[in-house]
Image (cartoon, grey):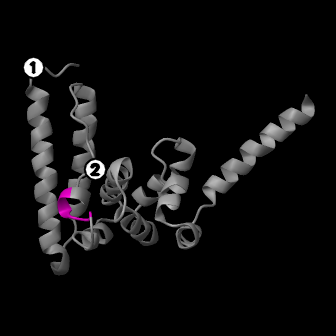
Amino acid sequence: MKNYILLFSGLILSFAVSAKSITPEIVIAYIDSKGTQSAREQYFSCWETDKAIGYKYVEEGSGPWLRIAAHLVSDSDGCYTHNLQSAIAMAQIKNPVEVLSMVDSGKKMEAENICVPFMTDETDKSKLLAQIVILEKIENSISKVKSKKATSKRDRCLNIVRSNKKYLQEKMQDKSVTN
């Protein structure tokens, strides 16, 4: 029994170490050897949370992870598309300049798709409020971008964020929304 516990503990520890040691270089090599769909399944799963670690890395906003997401979203579909675009949108909180530079840079990278994370149509006030808070963080972050080069993309994203925020704020007043 002791051996089984040690083996199980070792497996958990090795998984935890391997999940933390994923780098952009590892994912790029994986894409090069096995293709984008296989990489999405391995690092950006829609169904297995232990294989969805890539989304969190993208949300951190590092340039290499954002470029990986842009590459993977270009030929994705379904939940991969929504999740990758949402992760890119969330990255604006930490790295708005990099995300703004990606607006309209390729297939599925239009402002409408990457300026605001995917949001469900909620009827619960606490969930609506959580979505508003995320939009406020994104708005605050991209509002600070002053580069003339990014002005047009910043303004487009700000308009999209503010429009979504206004919609959610109005929905909070709706009588059908519950506490």
Magenta-drawn stretch, dominant element (helix, strand or loop):
loop
Local crowd size for mark 2, using a 10 Å CA cut-off: few (<14), some (14–19), many (≥20): many
The residue at 36%/47% (across/down) is: 79
Magenta-colored stretch includes residue 28: no
Residue 146 visible, this angle: yes
> 63 and 30: which one is in front?
30
Q: Which residue was labeled with disc 1?
A: 175
Pinpoint residue 58: horizontal percent, then vertical percent: 43, 59
How far apart, in angstroms, are the residues tagged by discs 1 and 2?
Answer: 25 Å
Mark closest to the chain's N terminus, 1 or 2: 2
- Highlighted magenta segment, given as a residue range: 108-112
What quarter of the picture does the N terminus occupy? top right
Q: Secondary structure at mark 1?
A: loop
Magenta-colored stretch includes residue 111: yes
Residue 140 visible, this angle: no
| Residue 110 location, quadrant | bottom left
The residue at 9%/43% (across/down) is: 166
